[in-house]
Amino acid sequence: MNNFEQLIAGDKPVLVDFFATWCGPCKMMHPILEELKQSIGDRATIIKIDVDEAQEFAVQYGVRAVPTLAIFKRGQLVWREAGVHSAQQLIQALEPFV
């Protein structure tokens, strides 16, 4: 996933949803992330990473619970929290970085 490293290195903030297909709370995040995308448009990028498919990223970023949401900007991890968050909470987390 070399394009992941390129994507998070940009000036635009990237919200990463570390999830698992078997995780109930992760499934709850899908419509929330859709709502978030409608609200922020192209001011930020939202991507999902399945921790079972990409275990190296889970290890690299210390993901021990799913869902874990992380914001990257210019290659740096600038915010991270585990659990389900509302679209409004995520907008507030993203605002300082857009």
Image: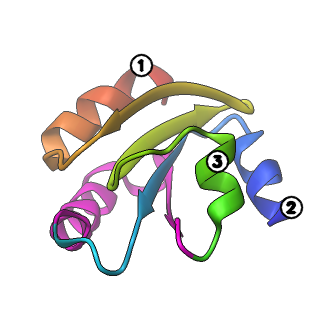
- Kind of residue at badge 3: Val
Dominant secondary structure, magenta: helix
- Kind of residue at badge 2: Asn
Query: At which x and y percent is residue 61?
Result: 61, 40
Q: Mark 1: few, some, or many residues within 10 Å (few <14, many ≥20)? A: few
State yes or no: residue 39 in magenta.
yes
The residue positioned 36% from the left and 27% from the top of the image is 95
Q: Mark 2: few, some, or many residues within 10 Å (few <14, many ≥20)? A: few
Q: Residue furthest right?
A: 2
Query: At which x and y percent is residue 9?
Result: 77, 39
Residue 59 - label: 3
State yes or no: residue 43 in magenta.
yes
Element type at mark 3: helix
- Kind of residue at badge 1: Pro
The residue positioned 43% from the left and 45% from the top of the image is 64
The residue positioned 52% from the left and 65% from the top of the image is 51
Select label 2 or label 1 by which is in front.
Answer: 2
Query: At which x and y percent is residue 88?
Result: 15, 40
